[in-house]
Amino acid sequence: MVLQKVHGMVSFRKGASKSMMMRNGELYIRSMGKMLKVEAYFPSTPDGVDSANILMIKHDNLAVVAEVDGLILLADKYDKGLAVAKKGAAAPNEP
């Protein structure tokens, strides 16, 4: 399921987390040695927490993967992610 329900815009500023990246117009975060697709994100505010909780109740496959740079990031619990090449190693072939 691809929700594409994303609130606001992510701007990559100097000093922003290196654990996030844009790929083909989609936001990914490095977690557990993989790049996981961010399905939705919200500001780290009380209203953002409430909105994230409501979305997770409606879509039980979603979970908080991280809170980074003032954003709450949600990903699919069943996303196997994209493999991340170790430093100095060649990147694996993508499906």
Image (cartoon, rainbow, N blue to C red):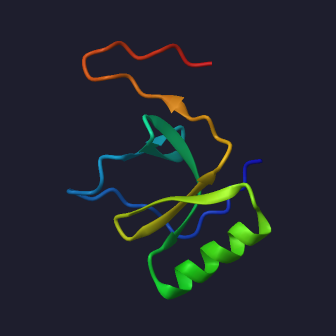
Q: Is residue 6 left or right of residue 70?
A: right
* Depth check, front residue: 64 or 16: 64
Please give left or right for residue 2 compared with residue 14 in the image.
right
Q: Is residue 30 above or below residue 5?
A: above
Q: Which quadrant of the rendered structure holds the C terminus?
A: top right
Taking 33 as reference, is 13 above or below it? below
- Image vertical order of residue 5 relative to residue 93, above or below: below
Q: Quadrant of residue 57?
A: bottom right
Residue 77 position in % (x across, y down): 65, 49
> Left or right: where does residue 84 sit relative to residue 42?
left
Please tell me how many numbered marks the rendered image carries. 0
Task: Name which residue lies at 21% across and 57% down.
Answer: 15
Residue furthest to the front in view is 32
Residue 47 or residue 80, whichever sits in front? 80
Residue in view at x 64 percent, y 40 percent: 79
Q: Can you tell which quarter of the image residue 24 is in?
A: top right
- Residue 49: x percent and y percent? 55, 79
Identify the residue at image location x=78%, y=69%: 58
Query: Could you tell me residue 34's position as x and y percent?
Result: 47, 35
Q: Quadrant of residue 50?
A: bottom right
Residue 75 point in image, percent of width and height: 60, 53
Which residue appears at 56% of the width and 45% of the height?
37
Residue placed farthest to the left in the image? Answer: 15
Report the front residue among 63 and 70: 63
Residue 14 lies left or right of residue 68; in this view the side is left
